[in-house]
Image (tube, helix red, strand yellow):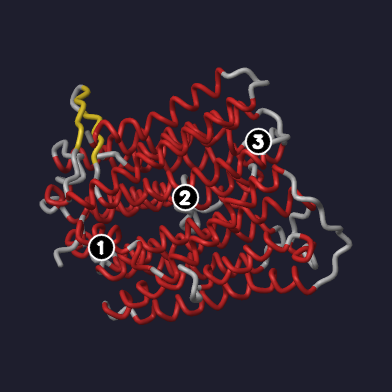
Amino acid sequence: MSIALVLLAIFSTTFGAIWVAVTPREAKTERNGVVLGASLASAVIVWRLLYLGLYSGVYPAFDLGVASLSLKLALDPLGLTYAVIASTLWVFASVYSLGYMASSHKQRQYFSFFLLSAGTTLGIAFSGNLFTFYLFYELLTFATYPLVVHGSSKEALEAGTRYIKYSLVGASFILAALVMLWRVTGGVLDFESLPSALCAAPSSQAVVIFFLFLIGFGVKAAIMPLHGWLPSAMVAPTPVSALLHAVAVVNAGVFGVLRTVYSVFGVDVVQSMNIQPLLLAICSITILMGSLIALKQDVLKRRLAYSTISQLAYILLGAFILHPLALAGAILHMIFHSTLKIVLFFSAGIVAEETGYVKISELKGVGRVLPLTLGSFGIISLGMVGMLPLSGFWSKYYLMRGSLATDFWILLVVLIISGFLNALYFVPITISAFTGKSDLEPRQKTRALWLMLVPTLILVGLGLVFGLWPGLTLPLVDAVVAQFFSL
């Protein structure tokens, strides 16, 4: 029954994509209904799977042999975490997209690949071995490429080319790691069997394989200096930017690194390789450099892009500390960063659509014209800084506890400095928006604006709820930690 639900979750949006592709251009009502219905159905199924997994503690798998390899779908707490984040936020992005794209061209193409990307993302989440993971991971690149170049401008095409080049280079590193892993382990690729199989592998070969995976997944995870594709991809429509930076692509890279550390190698093997200081240094540099570069950006979406680069490194930092508290912080940040950052992109998109402003220097006084939008941006910015009562506080709290528990006190300094830099590049935007003067006149709220505004406001409420009651997420977080640590 659970495996049937897994297949249904993946293929509901895939069938929706096909339906949208064959729907006549003028049938907008039908197309919009399919988009929303498919996204909602997929999310409901994933939440049902989450309930069944946490309630029963049983995570089934489905293995389809193909020659000497196998396509395997499986449930586990880590995969369900990524699936819940992606499927839930895809519903909000669907509603937002209906408003944002209401008067845009090539809507049929946009929504077809929009839904196809959703199904592919769930395929990554529910992959039970590295071969299946790799297939879905690369499919996601090609499913999201048409969304990046949707505007068809010279800038969009250049950004799409860069995105493909970076992604394919990353894919080549992952493939090389896969081949080496296959030879070292004698063909073992299942996540549940790999850590024990790698225990007997020569340390030098294990280190090479690990860094091949890290570089490969690090492209989408935007680890510096592999981040170059991400800021340029901001030319995509705002809902796509939100999905790229908060849900699908970047989280796919982060999820790949988490799988590498915990499902492929395991805590004991990674510790035995003596590479932890280097990994933590890479994350710390990415956290601080991303924040420093964000300070210099005047284009709002580019500032958000560099903020994403910095914030993703928080998750990787928690993963590389190799402690239960730090892993809990990483999973919490994966959840909370996604729900917070997507609001910031939604807000930036509303401002751009309603005013034509895309630069921070142009936003003086705009908060008086768009108070709900800029108010949402301001509230969520505090969450990104790590202030209560927003959810962002709790993930950073657990990361700090994990750092102290392992005597990596220097990481505490990195997190504090980063929080200060976050405040420097976020808070002045809101202050300027509500204190400056603007020549703009208030506009009547249209249906398209409400379709963009409502999901934004709901997600703001969600950020507050998680901040006030973080225990709502702890059953899932505890399940992930228990999956990899014997507590």
Q: Looking at numbered disc 3 in the image, what kind of residue is underneath it? A: Leu
- Near mark 1 (Cα within 10 A), the count class, few <14, some 14-19 or many ≥20, is some
Judge whether residue 90 can be spotted in this image. Answer: yes
Residue 200: % across, % down: 10, 51
Residue type indicated by callout 1: Asp
Give the distance between the C-alpha atoms of the residues marked 1 and 3, in whole angstroms: 43 Å
Label 2 crowd bin: few (<14), some (14–19), many (20+), radius 10 Å: many
Residue ID at (35%, 61%): 331
- Name the front one of labels 1 and 2: 1
Residue 157, labelled with which disc? 3
Q: Earlier in the sequence, mark 3 or mark 2?
A: 3
Crowd band around label 3 with a 10 angstrom C-alpha radius: few (<14), some (14–19), many (20+): many
Query: Residue 430 is drawn in which quadrant?
Result: bottom right
Q: Point out the image quarter for the N terminus.
A: top left
Earlier along the polypeptide chain: callout 1 or callout 2? 2
The residue to which callout 1 is attached is: 478
Q: Nearer the viewer, residue 332 or 324?
A: 332
Mark 1 or 3: in front is 1
Please report whichever mark, 1 or 3, sits nearer to the chain's N-terminal start: 3
Please tell me which residue is depicted at 61% across the width and 65% down the height of the picture: 293
Q: Which residue is mark 2?
A: 250
Question: Which image quadrant: the C terminus?
Answer: bottom left
Res 63 → quadrant: top left
